[in-house]
Image (spheres, coloured by chain):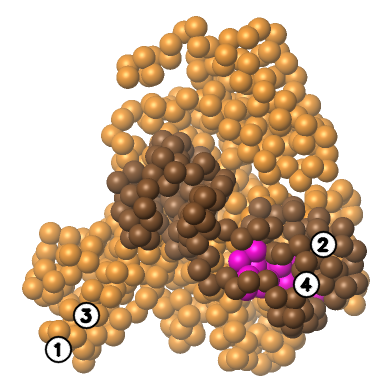
Chain colours: A brown, B orange
């Protein structure tokens, strides 16, 4: 997302040091790093391991287990389409094809110009107002193809 | 005197423009020189009417909806601040049949109060249950929860009081209360709605649990797909702690109880209690073997209550109104109320809290008014991605743990997802297996491998490849997953698959064009 700064090990160390006191600190640290830099840089893994007295393998294992953590920066805008049953009942499979065409990117990848990442998500908790889409952390409901295009136009994204 | 006006700040309401409506109202009022007291409440749960704007009048709150920013000027012209008539008038909010015919206990305050106002919370019965509980011994609290008949609202339906008793009787220097707010089931949003609409109810419920078993530290594990709920709930913890309601001493007279909200990271499996505990400990969310039960060796190896959010948020009302009053709702061994989430292809989706025993038909046809598309109903999936698909002929099944088990289904977290006649149940069955493959923690073979093989076999059946042999294979695979998986993910994925096969066999036979699809 737009707020991410380039990875800086000194800032990362500072972020980590501020959270090591928490019981089970790994996830809070990973969240804080991702919020700061937009992803979890591989260089952060040994820093976390040292701070928590765990192995690099353990930290790497956690980073890769959870869908939420990125190992590379996302595009400038992150567009998440719900793929779960309630949204299926309202046509999210068609919306997914439409979104891929409109954005010119396959589900689960980032556009070549790095301006948008299209991702699947399994439930956003907006199941009475399906299909649901989350754009840069903002939830949208009843998103049909026309509404999707409006939202993308608002981002100023060319096709 | 300025008029009180309510515009929800619930994420679902925001998703259809409640934020822009609130801005438009503030702007319009300023232009007209009208003083407003704007409250950003949670949602009442009538989601098809969102953004639902309410105005406080001498005769009570009246509703308008669904409101768009373009309607705002007209609403002022119609004198809506005094309840004036308008095309969007819905009359007194609590007289809307969808709302009026509910039995709101757990969600009694949701949509009514300002979510973060402690004064509102207290004025609507807040902390009364906790005050009562503080006058009881741990054993008495546990006994009353047991007597209330409350069962785990996350899906398993295990008696809450029995779980608490185990933790109470486990000697330890440290105990924990953990709230499972990893609401990953499609079709469910009750946890989110409560965290955003009445967060102190959960804090109060967790405090009662802590007092009951002697826990001094609590965690709420909230999924990362709910950033809005996480923010609201974290703010609620901060406010309650600063006000001295929790923290060093519960309500200033009780024992210490510190509460922390933790964010998940997009893993469906972390809704399984032992996987959730692993995640809280900072590890991969691998499911643990049981025993030992979390009640004996839970978080960091200590006795831990792990309850669903709805279970914990229901505890205060049990002590506020008395366990007998709660137990008197419901049917059979399903006591009290269930917050049902009506979702998917439905005209009037939302949250309906009713005593157990209401039928699917009443929910879908009466509350829901049929499909959103206007096409004929074809199937309903109850209980999330691991729940069974039911046809029209099973719509008279009452919502009751045992009645659902009898038709090879489960209530889960109370999500009801409706499908019209465009649904292809073979595709849905394949999706169930694919979802399991995507979300499996990988610890046990039936789930890790079985789900991938299951998706492949269903694909072959759809393609008409060795149909009869592959149907036998699929049945065998489902039996293996049911019996051999470590947890409910692999163990229940066969539910949607087998129910689709049983009730919608034609969808699996492409040599016969399904009547619904043929009509296209």
Q: Is residue B311 visible?
A: no
Q: Position of residue B198 (x, y in %)?
A: 49, 72
What residue sits right under mark 4 in the picture? A25
**Residue at the spot of label 2:** A59
Residue stretch rendered in magenta on the structure: A23-39
Type of secondary structure dominating the magenta stretch: helix
* Disc 4/disc 1 C-alpha distance (Å): 51 Å
In three-dimensional space, the C-alpha distance between marks 1 and 2, rounded to whole angstroms, equals 58 Å
Same chain shared by disc 3 and disc 2: no
Q: Chain of mark 3?
A: B
Badge number at residue B33: 1
Please report the residue visible at 73 percent of the width from the left and 62 percent of the height from the top: B306
**Which quarter of the figure has residue B449?**
top right
Above-or-below relation of A13 to B308: below
The kind of secondary structure element at disc 1 is loop
The chain ID associated with circle 4 is A
User: Is label 1 or label 2 in front?
Assistant: 2
Question: Is any atom of residue B450 visible in this view?
Answer: yes
Question: Residue visible at 75% across and 19% down?
Answer: B476
Q: How far apart are labels 4 and 3 at the CA level? A: 44 Å
**The C terminus of chain B - image quarter:** top left
The location of residue A43, given as percent across then percent down, is 78, 66
Residue farthest to the front, as pictured: A113
């Amino acid at each position: 997302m737009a707020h991410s700064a380039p990875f800086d090990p000194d800032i990362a160390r500072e972020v980590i040091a501020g959270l090591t006191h928490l019981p089970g600190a790994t996830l809070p640290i990973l969240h804080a790093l991702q919020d700061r830099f937009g992803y979890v840089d591989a260089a952060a893994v040994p820093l976390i391991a040292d701070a928590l007295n765990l192995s690099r393998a353990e930290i790497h294992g956690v980073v890769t287990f959870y869908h939420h953590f990125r190992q590379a920066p996302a595009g400038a805008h992150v567009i998440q389409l719900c793929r779960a049953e309630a949204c299926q009942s309202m046509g999210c499979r068609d919306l997914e094809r439409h979104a891929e065409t409109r954005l010119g990117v396959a589900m689960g990848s980032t556009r070549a110009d790095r301006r948008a990442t299209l991702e699947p998500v399994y439930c956003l908790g907006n199941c009475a107002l399906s299909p649901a889409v989350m754009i840069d952390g903002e939830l949208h409901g009843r998103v049909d193809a026309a509404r999707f295009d409006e939202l993308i136009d608002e981002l100023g994204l060319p096709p | 005197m300025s008029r009180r006006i309510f515009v929800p700040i619930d994420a679902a309401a925001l998703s259809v423009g409640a934020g822009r409506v609130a801005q438009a109202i503030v702007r319009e009022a300023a232009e007209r020189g009208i003083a407003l007291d704007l409250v950003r409440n949670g949602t009442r749960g009538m989601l098809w009417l969102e953004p639902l704007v309410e105005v406080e009048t001498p005769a009570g709150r009246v509703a308008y909806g669904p409101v768009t920013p373009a309607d705002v000027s007209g609403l002022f012209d119609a004198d809506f601040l005094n309840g004036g008539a308008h095309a969007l008038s819905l009359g007194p909010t609590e007289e809307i049949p969808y709302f009026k015919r509910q039995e709101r206990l757990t969600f009694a305050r949701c949509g009514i109060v300002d979510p973060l106002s402690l004064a509102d919370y207290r004025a609507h019965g807040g902390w009364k249950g906790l005050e009562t509980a503080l006058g009881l011994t741990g054993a008495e609290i546990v006994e009353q929860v047991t007597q209330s008949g409350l069962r785990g609202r996350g899906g398993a339906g295990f008696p809450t009081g029995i779980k608490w008793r185990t933790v109470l009787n486990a000697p330890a220097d440290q105990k924990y209360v953990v709230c499972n707010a990893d609401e990953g089931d499609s079709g469910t949003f009750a946890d989110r709605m409560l965290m955003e609409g009445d967060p102190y109810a959960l804090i109060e419920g967790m405090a009662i649990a802590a007092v009951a078993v002697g826990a001094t530290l609590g965690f709420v594990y909230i999924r990362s797909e709910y950033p809005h709920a996480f923010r609201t709930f974290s703010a609620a913890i901060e406010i309650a702690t600063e006000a001295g309601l929790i923290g060093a001493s519960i309500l200033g007279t009780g024992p210490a109880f510190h509460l922390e909200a933790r964010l998940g990271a997009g893993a469906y499996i972390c809704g399984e209690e032992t996987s959730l505990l692993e995640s809280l400990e900072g590890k991969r969310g691998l499911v643990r073997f049981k025993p030992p039960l979390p009640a004996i060796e839970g978080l960091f190896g200590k006795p831990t209550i792990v309850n669903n959010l709805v279970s914990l948020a229901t505890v205060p009302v049990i002590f506020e109104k008395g366990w007998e009053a709660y137990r008197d709702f419901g049917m059979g061994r399903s006591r009290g109320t269930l917050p049902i989430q009506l979702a998917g292809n439905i005209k009037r989706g939302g949250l309906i809290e009713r005593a157990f025993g209401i039928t699917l038909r009443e929910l879908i046809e009466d509350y829901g008014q049929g499909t959103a598309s206007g096409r004929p109903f074809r199937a309903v999936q109850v209980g999330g991605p691991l729940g069974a698909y039911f046809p029209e002929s099973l719509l008279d099944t009452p919502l009751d743990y045992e009645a659902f088990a009898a038709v090879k289904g489960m209530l889960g977290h109370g999500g009801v997802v409706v499908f019209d006649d465009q649904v292809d149940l073979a595709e849905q069955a394949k999706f169930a297996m694919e979802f399991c493959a995507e979300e499996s923690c990988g610890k046990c073979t039936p789930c890790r491998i079985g789900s991938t093989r299951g998706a492949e076999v269903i694909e072959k059946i759809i393609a008409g490849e060795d149909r009869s042999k592959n149907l036998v294979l699929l049945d065998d695979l489902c039996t293996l997953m049911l019996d051999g998986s470590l947890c409910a993910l692999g163990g229940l994925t066969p539910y949607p698959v087998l129910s689709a096969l049983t009730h919608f066999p034609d969808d699996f036979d492409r040599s016969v064009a399904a009547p619904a699809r043929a009509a296209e």
